[in-house]
Amino acid sequence: MSGFLDTSITNAMPDIPRLFTAICEWLACMTYIMVVYRRVTWQRTAMAATAGLVAITAVQYLSGAMPLWFWIVGMLLAFGCMWAVIWLGAGTGKREGLYLAARAFVLAELVASLHWQLTMFLEYGMGLPHRQPFSTLALIATYALCFAAAWLAERGNFSSDAPTAVTAQLAVGTVAITIVTFAMSNLSFVSTNTPFSGKIGQEVFYIRTLVDFCGFVILYAQQEQARRLAANMELASINAQLESQHQEYLASKQNLESIGRLAHDLKHQIAALRAEVDPQHAAAGFEQLERSVADYSAQQHSGNPVLDVILTTKTRTCHERGITFTAVADGALLAKTRMTSMDIATLFGNALDNAIEATSRLDDPQQRLIRLALYRQGAFTVIRVENYYDAVLKKDAAGNLRTTKRNATGHGFGVKSIRHIAAQYGGDVSITAEDHWFTLTVLIP
């Protein structure tokens, strides 16, 4: 025995043209840009896409003209170009761009390999002559079907409204899967002397396509699992906040009932003391005491007992913080929406808490203004909470308002819980910020 196996490929077929590989990589980038397109200008996307196509094509031809050892360097450069195209063209973060570029790279390898395998089968397997119009039509059809299918599959795995939450662990895992997929799919071109290599031309392309397909499926399942975990965590946080708001409502209700009884008893005590003692200076003190008791005994009467508790509690909070709070609410409308007590407490509690927190930071007491309105408009119950603001509102890449807290982790669920409640009743939520007025509007059928 010679001590080693033959490392040559039998019936070797032409490799994929560099231009086809470049087009595949560019189209893969475009596919993921359309999946996660952010609110960036179309001019920026067009510039990134045009420059990316030129750069990716140049890298591919440069790699083909260089020695074999430059092959790995060329692939790294091509991957870097794909990352830049997605990062700049879709307005993603750097880590999210890296994550999507890895997925796009595997998709490009899969489509390029599948197209070339079909082309070689038709020419070598079925003996069809190589004609340019036919080859071009096969390329367009294969690329169109594959990238359209990838877009349809991936658009449900990503959100176009919010950036994808990519942890360091998820990014590292994705890059590792991409490296392994690329290495295993191209192993036969490096050496046929391994248990995982093919030795026949058509067999090599079949292995390459199959491994790339498996890599794409694994990355798809990985993203779907990550999305489900994130959704479950967010839902758990929202439910925890709902329960917290409900418990706060129950505690506030008990406190108000106790204060109401206390105020009622104090009124009788003051009346009795006034009848027995009637000096002028004592009368003034009694009147002041009576006004203080009246502040605590004053309650909102909107027509809904749950809303009354929330409005009374928040009115007292606004009074303590020097905020002018105005509420015009027809609480009877909430009965028509069949909204539960817990949802009423959570929706109004979150909306007013956000407004109070934002307004409390204003230096000018005259600017500390909050307005609440609950009314009917057509077939909808409208809930509108407005507060004055005097600051620069920051938005993320998706156009959503960022939290003003230093630690953003765990915050931002107030509006999400409001959206969650509105969606349960077939409603919608809109947020506007114009002329220093921040407005939260909830429409419920």
Image (cartoon, rainbow, N blue to C red):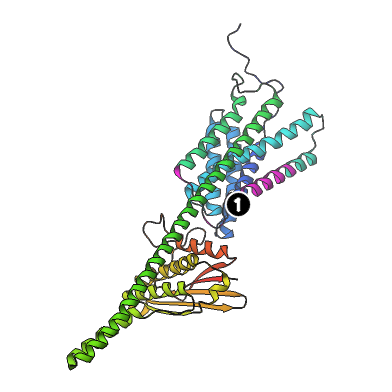
Residue drawn at 47 percent across, 57 percent down? 239
Q: Is residue 42 left or right of residue 363?
A: right
Q: Position of residue 254 (x, y in %)?
A: 37, 69
Residue 130 location, quadrant: top right
Residue drawn at 39 percent across, 65 percent down? 248
* Looking at the image, residue 380 lies above or below residue 202: below
- Determine crowd level at label 1: few under 14, some 14-19, many 20+ residues with C-alpha closer than 10 A: many
Indicate the quadrant containing the N terminus: top left, top right, bottom left or bottom right: top right
* Looking at the image, residue 251 lies above or below residue 21: below
Using the image as rendered, state which of residue 168 and residue 49 is in the foreground: 168
Task: Residue 289: say if magenta.
Answer: no
Q: Is residue 388 visible?
A: no
Q: Is residue 9 visible?
A: yes
Residue drawn at 59 percent across, 78 percent down? 377
Q: Position of residue 116 (x, y in %)?
A: 70, 35
* Looking at the image, residue 6 lies above or below residue 307: above
Q: Position of residue 24 (x, y in %)?
A: 65, 42
Q: Which residue corresponds to mark 1?
A: 35
Q: Amino acid at mark 1?
A: Val
**Magenta span:** 141-168
Identify the element where label 1 is drawn. Answer: helix
* Looking at the image, residue 146 lies above or below residue 159: above
Using the image as rendered, state which of residue 435 and residue 58 is in the foreground: 435
Using the image as rendered, state which of residue 411 and residue 390 is in the foreground: 411
Indicate the quadrant containing the C terminus: top left, top right, bottom left or bottom right: bottom right
